[in-house]
Image (tube, grey):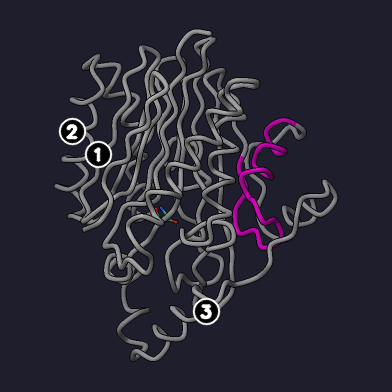
Amino acid sequence: MSEFVIAVHGGAGAWRLGVGREALEDVIRRALQKGAEVMRSGSCLEAVVEAIASLEDSGILNAGVGSTLDYLGRVSMDAGLMRSDGRAGAVALVTYPRNPIRLAKIVMERTPHVLIAGPEADELARRMGLERHPGPSERALAKWRELRERPESEWVRARIEAATALGYDTVGAVALGPDGCLAAGASTGGVSLKLPGRIGDSPVPGAGFYANENIAVSATGIGETILLSMSSLRLADAYLQVGELEEALERVVSDHSKRWGLNTLGLIAVTRRGEVGGRYNAEAMPWGYMKGGEIRVLGIPA
Ligand code: ASP
C-alpha cells in the first residue's frame, strides 16, 4: 500500500492543563492510531471521522463528551468535514450526538445540504440512530462553576478577550489517503461561556476546515477571527501561491497575528505531496502526525 499521512490537533490556546502531559500525548497518539487503522481499510474521510471521534470521546478536550459549556451551562457543539472532491457536511449548535463529526458525515453523504443547525440537526442525529451525548462532563461543569464565580463583567464583556483568557481546545484532523484523496475536519464545544446560539468557525468550510485537490486544512483558535479571515481557505490559497507548506503556514499565521493578535489561530495541514505541518500563534497546540508509519507528537504545553 502506498503511503498515507494523518495529522490531528487538540486545540490551540492558552492551555490550563487539567491533565498530565502524558494523558494528552496519549489522546493524540490514540487518535492517530485510530485514523490510521481506518485508513488501512477505508478512505481518508473515514480516517478523519474516526480520528476526530476518538478525540471527541477523550473527555479531556473541548469537543464531544468533553465539550465546554455556554453561558447558561449547556453543551452545544459544532463540527464539519470536507473532502478533496469538494463535498462537505457540517452541523452547528447540536446537543444530541455524542460525536457531532459523525452527524456532519451524515449531512454530507445523506442530505443535499452542507450545514444543518440546532434542534433539526439533533432530530436528524436521533433518526439516524447516533449515540446520545451523556451531557456536561464533571470537568466541564467544574470549570463552568469556577468561571461563573467571577464577576460577570469579566467574562461576557468581550467574547474574544474571554476566549483568549480562558483557553480553548477544539479538535481537528487532516488526512491524505493512499489513493491521493484528501480530507479535513473539525469539532468543538465552542468557546467557554459563549452566548447561547453562538456558532464559531468549526462548522464553516473555508474557515474551520477546508480540502481541495492540493491540501487539507483544519483550524483552531478564536472562531470569530477565523470566520472573518477564512483561515483554512487562506492557507489553501497561500499554498497554491508559494508551493511549499511550511512557508504558506508561516505566512498565514503571521498575517493572522498581525491582524488579530496572539492566541487566535492554530492550523494543521497535509498536502497532496505528503507534506504535513502545524503552526500556531498561541502558547501551545497539542498536535501530531503519522507518516511512513511513524508517529510524532508536538506542541504539548509545558
Ligand atoms: N475555533 C473554536 C471556536 O471558536 C474554538 C477552538 O478552536 O478551540 O468555536
Q: Is residue 93 magenta?
A: yes
Q: Position of residue 92 (x, y in %)?
A: 60, 53
| Front residue of this view, candidates 63 and 251 | 63
Mark linked to residue 141 = 3
At mark 2, the secondary structure is helix
The C terminus lies in which quarter of the figure? Answer: bottom left
Q: Position of residue 116 (x, y in %)?
A: 67, 47
Residue occupied by mark 2 = 250
Q: In whole angstroms, how far apart are the C-alphas of marks 3 and 2?
A: 37 Å
Q: Is residue 230 above or below residue 76?
A: above
Mark 2 close to ligand 1, CB under 8 Å: no
Mark 1 close to ligand 1, CB under 8 Å: no
Q: Is residue 201 above or below residue 302?
A: above
Q: Is residue 84 above or below residue 298?
A: above
Is 40 left or right of 139, judged from the image as shown?
A: right
Residue lying at 21% horizontally and 56% vertically, measured from the top left = 283
- Which one is closest to the eye, mark 3 or mark 2? 3
Is 180 left or right of 245, judged from the image as shown?
A: right
Q: Position of residue 204 (x, y in %)?
A: 50, 43
Residue occupied by mark 1 = 279
Q: Is residue 210 above or below residue 31?
A: above
Residue lying at 37% horizontally and 61% vertically, measured from the top left = 168
Identity, as a three-letter code, of the amino acid under mark 3: Leu
Q: In whole angstroms, how far apart are the C-alphas of marks 1 and 3?
A: 31 Å
Mark 3 close to ligand 1, CB under 8 Å: no
Label 2 crowd bin: few (<14), some (14–19), many (20+), radius 10 Å: some
Is 245 left or right of 87, judged from the image as shown?
A: left
Identity, as a three-letter code, of the amino acid under mark 1: Arg
N-terminal label among 3 and 2: 3
Residue lying at 28% horizontally and 65% vertically, measured from the top left = 164
N-terminal label among 1 and 3: 3
Range of the magenta residues? 90-109
